[in-house]
Image (cartoon, grey):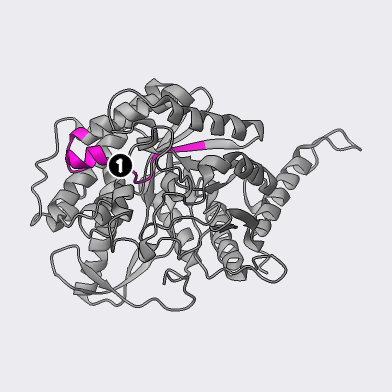
Amino acid sequence: MSAGPEAGAFPPDFLWGAATAAYQIEGAADEDGRGRSIWDTYSHTPGRVRDGDTGDVAADHYHRWRDDVALMADLGLGSYRFSVAWPRVQPGGRGPANQKGLDFYSGLVDALLERGIEPWVTLYHWDLPDELEQAGGWPARDTADRFAEYAGLVVGALGDRVRFWTTLNEPWCSAFLGYASGAHAPGRHEPAASVAAAHHLLLGHGLAAQALRAGGAEQVGITLNFTPALPADDHPAVVDAARRVDGLHNRFFLDALVRGRYPDDVRADLAALTDFGFEGDGDAATIAAPLDLLGVNYYTRQVVSTSAMPGAAVVETSPPEGRLTEMGWAVDPDGLGDLLRRLHREYGDLSLYVTENGAAFADVVAADDGVHDEERTAYLAAHLGSCAAAIADGVPLRGYFVWSLMDNFEWAHGYSKRFGVVHVDYATQQRRVKDSGRWYADLIRAHRARHVAATSPSRSTGRAAR
């Protein structure tokens, strides 16, 4: 088992956490007034999700959350990043709140705080109310306004106890997998609409951030999924293809959020699809309001080989090399450190948090009732080592959240991929902490113990022990 980074490599106030998403774990799809989301519709459409799986039950967290919070406390988590299901709070995406939905999250927040776990709320992790999709979805500007209204309802209920808020999780996925490739809900194949969706997601972020701050939120940000792109060689077409991947995956969102504009080269790349007529006066300023934090989701990076459609954002990537996860993704921990350094170098002193990092492997329950996931432990150790090296280089990385706390519904892959540091037996809903979870808990305890030792008065001198 990998030893991993030294606990002392992380600052004393480093936030150790784990993350989940509502549709992936909650279940209770038809209970207590919850409405239908685009993922309910998508997963119930034949052929969309592997094995016909749905999130109807998932990990049954809606009924088992008290035990799950106790499990988090046993792991020593300092924070739990979870998403609020929009259709559980606003079944149709507009109008008054469903009180039973708010009560569920309020109880969860109270239980976390009682255990000394910082609640971290993500407002949107892909579960758009289906009624809003039928009215146009994210390509429609009104959806951004509805999102801000929803944000106000949630902060009104939880803002007195929750400090950390992220508006959106991975808007690239929502826009381009949902509306261009159709690989995610709602499953549309409309490239031009996907660009409008991306803009309205960012506008929704800005409007929701205003609502959150008006409601007293202390720390407001957004979580982006980053795909560092390297050219396979120095051929001009390959270099340009890598530029386009970086532009659409990374800079399109970052530049709008931090610099108040979309990159000129990305606008040119997308000119065949749209004239950006969906932009309204004042949108750029709304989107670019200062961030208190930036969430960084990282799993792997791409090596771009050739351009499949010169002048467009469609590329081919080289087959991954070396160790692969069950998702077929290359294990590339150095990519995380390089990404963190780049964000700090090019986008300034943003407070960074790794809000998702983890890996799917073929976990099995052994004869001794344990799950001995050595590959995942090695993955986490290597990526946390890369984080520690970035911190040593001056990167303001404030925390790390493993993806995921527990095995769950992995979107179009259904239940075939397991990312959790806690194993879930879907037939019985039994939880088992995997070896990777125990390793992570040991690292958290070591960090905490070191901090306590460093700040405790010395018995001999009365001074702080060093």
Q: Position of residue 223 (x, y in %)?
A: 40, 45
Q: How many marks can you see?
A: 1
Q: In this view of the protein, which residue sits in the foreground, 407 or 250?
A: 407
- Identify residue type, mark 1: Leu
Residue tagged 1: 128
Instruction: Name the residue rendered at 15%, 55% in the picture.
Output: 191
Q: Using the rendered image of the protein, determine whether residue 243 is visible from the camera's viewpoint.
A: yes
Give me the residue at 54% from left, 49% from top: 400
Of the 4 image quadrants, the one containing the N terminus is bottom right
Q: Residue at x 55, y 66 (%)?
A: 379
* Crowd around label 1: few <14 · some 14–19 · many ≥20 (10 Å): many
Residue furthest right as drawn: 460
- Front residue of 383 and 433: 433
Q: Specify whether 98 is left or right of 172.
A: right
Q: Position of residue 73 (x, y in %)?
A: 67, 43
Give the x, y percent position of residue 263.
Answer: 21, 50
* Residue 259 visible in the displayed image: no
Asked if the stretch drawn in magenta spans residue 128, the answer is yes
| Magenta range | 120-142
Q: Quadrant of residue 153?
A: top left
Does the magenta segment cover residue 30? no
Query: Which quadrant of the figure contains the C terminus?
Result: top right
Dot 1 lies on which element? loop
* Position above or below: 4 against 238: above
Q: Taking 449 as reference, is 109 left or right?
A: left
Instruction: Give percent across and percent down for residue 366.
Output: 66, 70
